[in-house]
Amino acid sequence: MTLAATAAGQGFLSPGGVEIAFLLVGLATLGAAVVTVTTRQLVHAALWLVVALGGIAIEYLLLTAEFIAWVQVLIYVGSVVVLLLFGLMLTKAPIGRSPDADSGNRWAALIVALASAGTLVWVVVDAFRATWINLDAVQGSTETTGRSLFQYWVLPFEALSVLLLAALVGAIVLSRRGGEGKAPAAALRNTTATAPAPREEQR
Amino acid sequence: MTLTTTAVLVPLLPFLGAVAGLFLGRRAPGFVRPLAVLPTLAAAALTVVVAVGQGGGTATDVATRLTPTGSIPIDLALHVDGFAALMAVLVGVVATCVQLYSTAYLREDPRYASYAALVSLFTSAMLLVVYTGDLMVLLVGWEVMGICSYFLVGHYWETETARAASLKAFLVTKLGDVPFLFGIFALAADAGTFRITGILGSVANRGLDHPTLIALLLLAGVAGKSAQFPLHTWLPDAMAGPTPVSALIHAATMVAAGIYVVARLLPVFAASAAALIVMAVMAAITMVGSGLAALAQDDIKRVLAYSTVGQLGYMLGALAVGDRGAAVFHLLTHGAFKALLFLGAGVIIHAAGTNSLAAMSRMTGLARRIPDAYWTVTVALLALAAIPPFAGFFSKEAVLGAAEHAATGGAHGIPGAAGWTVLVSGLLTALLTAAYATRLWLLVFKGSGVEAPDHGRQPLVMNAVLWVLFVPTLALGLTAPFLPDWFDGRSLAPALTTSVLGTGIAVAGGLVTYAAWRHTTALAARTPIGAVIADPDAPPGLAEETAIATHAPVYGSVAAAPDPADPGRLLLGPLQPHAAVGFHLDAVYTALFVRPVRAAATLVRFLDREVVDTYVRGAGAAPRWLGAAVRRAQTGNVQTYLGALLAGSLVLAVAAVLIATGTGA
Amino acid sequence: MHLAYPAVLAVLLFCTGLYGVLARRNAILVLMSVELMLNAVNLNLVAFDVWLRDTLHAGQALTLFTITVAAAEIGIGLAIVLLVYRNRGSSDIDRLRDLAERPDGADAEATNRQPDTEAEATA
């Protein structure tokens, strides 16, 4: 097979320890991701997302990018998922299995996703099947990352802080209760469990 | 002032008067009457000056070329000879009379200003036609007359009759004008010039290439303008206009323009024997047919209109036998007595309050109410019937004499058949003319029944004009011995044979009509006939408008009335209903032209609405269906959009990869 | 290590996220799927950075930036979802169909009525 005949002499059929670890973690990550997008329990989806994101953090570590890995754990697992869980709760997401978690065009989505996956895998494998990553030197230690970040990427870094500030302000403005949002908000308070109730009142 | 300057001033003065009248009509109503009468009066005086200055001598020719216009030059040319000088005098005098008459006749008309200006413009155009020496300039005057006639016939445009009549007059004359235009072009192309003298010179020297074609094309225009068969139908309908307009345009001048043009260009027509025969036959049909139709008309003005058509037929007959002197002589006398007749008819209509002969024949004492009109109209009718010693006798005898001259082979280059045709039809028409003149006179003035309504005295100026025109009606015939100097030099004195024959026939016609009238007048009392009589205090114009507008509703037709006491009904016998409607020529036109045009219009409308629009609607429907189909995709579901977007970009990416790697294409 | 391993993993994660974006009904789940896709990209960036041994470490720097941007995005996104939920009583993406065109062109009226009928359909 052509897959086995690589230029550097490292075949796919004789993986090293790192590669085996990467494969296994990758499979776990992928599985968690698939469960995330398929599970009918919304809160479980968020929790499975934690697994997937954590798996990616381990993959970063395996790729010797340790700083990125910790940032991943901190921000994604630590804050983003928490944020999502809050979102789920604030929108009164049902606890337990909800039969209508998937929309009607699930099969179309599946087809598109599978086709994309097939195409991209084909392209990627075709392009990189003989490429070898040398993991001997650590590429992403905190020191090197920090050095490059504050030597070469200072300006984008500062710009990013402004972006974060803007996002902060935007989020506050958007989620503030008041102004014209009062009537729906009042309607929302009277809502019991189902959505149509406030509509009834508005009429 | 030289003759040329005077002659140029003649058409110019009424034109300026018309322009000033149009501009000042609204702002300064006080100026309208002087502006209408004075320029025309001055022009009439100048025409007399020109005529005296010309004096029957050699023709005056002046030309100026404004600018080169292409292959054949167009000149502002003046050509004043005996014909032109006398014609201009007639036009000037009649126009002045009509303007004077109108000041009284239309004195309370709100549109008098524009009416007077149009009459002035018309006079100017006619004088231009008379004096010009260039065919293109003549055409300008010719067309201006046509449009003025359209506006003036439609003066009472509130009435349906007048609207239809003006449109008909315009369209029918235009139908003749188109061949006329082609004829002028063909003539100029053959002769190399638009100058009439140049054309006549080239005809005399080397002849024309297509004399028959040119003559027939020109003849079509003449038939339209001079109301000859088969384009005469507009003239009786044009009587829906005010009476002065009928007098000016449809008796004395505009319809005479056609005859005048033929007279000016007679050598062109004489170059083709076929054209002369056609002319003679046309004149014969016109004469006899109009005489019969005139006997059946009920509207007094329509009788006179058909009479005009017949007299114009006489003139065309004279031209067909090559005697333009006789034609123009008859034109002059006819212009005088027919203008008098029409203006008198205006007075009669005002006095009687109706234009229906049937209604007038049931009134007593109309003659006593309007003695001026009674006497002048009587003499004019005698002149029309060609009873000596009135003007019509001499001119008609001149025509018949010329016809007899040609029939017996005395005229060089004139087919004998044309002479015989004109002679026989002329004599027949003399009988008919006398008959309808007698009928008119008897029905109007010798009616019996209720007393005619009292309108008081007619306006002084109207009666005065009648007497002015009475003079030439009475005496113009006596100038016959002097006129040959002004014309071609051929004698116009009556010949003994035709005089006796013609007068005898005319007297016979009159007597037969009188006998018939005596027979039928007893019926008149027994069959009362309804009539709409206008308010005695109404101004003349309004009385006439009312009479015209109510004739058709009351009697069922604008032309005839179901009157058993009418001597014309007895004389015509079974022909009467056909003669009343002009021998169904309008119906023939309807069948030949109107219906096909309407059918074509319906077809076009069908094609437009059903066929063309189907494509248009189809062109609209296809995108609409497409839009409806595409709209289905607009579900509002973002996920569907995104899915489709990704699928599409996926396909593009695959295609791009395949092409980039060279495996696909 | 073969570059193909992280690359293929990234592809598969990305497509999983893609499926989630297209198939999930709840807006927050869609946001989760977007996070998955972003992480797939990050994995790619890191892998290529390690492979190319970039002296500027552009890949890792960009990854950091992406994570930051993703955090901002999730904040704003959640705020929007909350607002939509507050206004409409539902955060189901395929029920927010104001973009759809009404056949009779009565858009103004339809915008007022449409969510109600849709909401009733779900009830």
Image (cartoon, coloured by chain):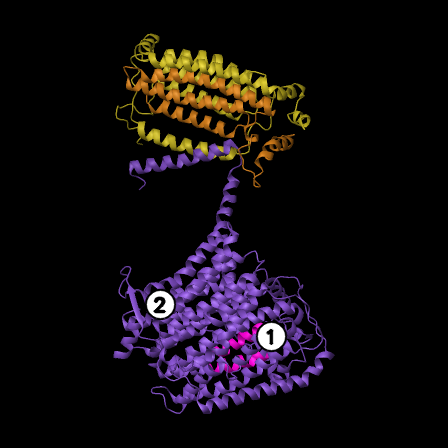
Q: Amino acid at mark 1?
A: Tyr
Crowd rating for badge 1 (residues with CA inside 10 Å; few <14, some 14–19, many 20+): many
Residue B164 - label: none
Quadrant showing the C terminus of chain C = top right
Of B634 and B426, nearer the camera is: B426
Of B133 and B639, nearer the camera is: B133
Left or right for B188, reference B417: left
Is residue C83 on the magenta stretch?
no
Q: Amino acid at mark 2?
A: Thr
Residue B132 - label: 2
- Badge 1 marks a residue whose secondary structure is helix
Of C110 and B317, nearer the camera is: B317
Residue annotated with mark 1: B374
Which chain, by letter, is orange? C
Q: Chain of mark 1?
A: B
- Badge 2 marks a residue whose secondary structure is loop
Residue depicted at 39% across the width and 79% down the height: B483
Q: Quadrant of residue A112?
A: top left
Which chain, by letter, is yellow? A
Query: Between tags 2 and 1, which lies in front?
Result: 1
Q: Give the spatial CA distance, label 2 vs label 1.
A: 39 Å
Quadrant showing the N terminus of chain C = top left
The answer to whether A32 is drawn above or below residue B425 in the figure is above
Give the mark, 2 or 1, whose residue is nearer the N terminus: 2
The answer to whether B558 is drawn above or below residue A146 in the figure is below
Residue extending farthest to the top is: A143
Write down the region rendered in magenta.
B283-311
Q: Quadrant of residue B175?
A: bottom left
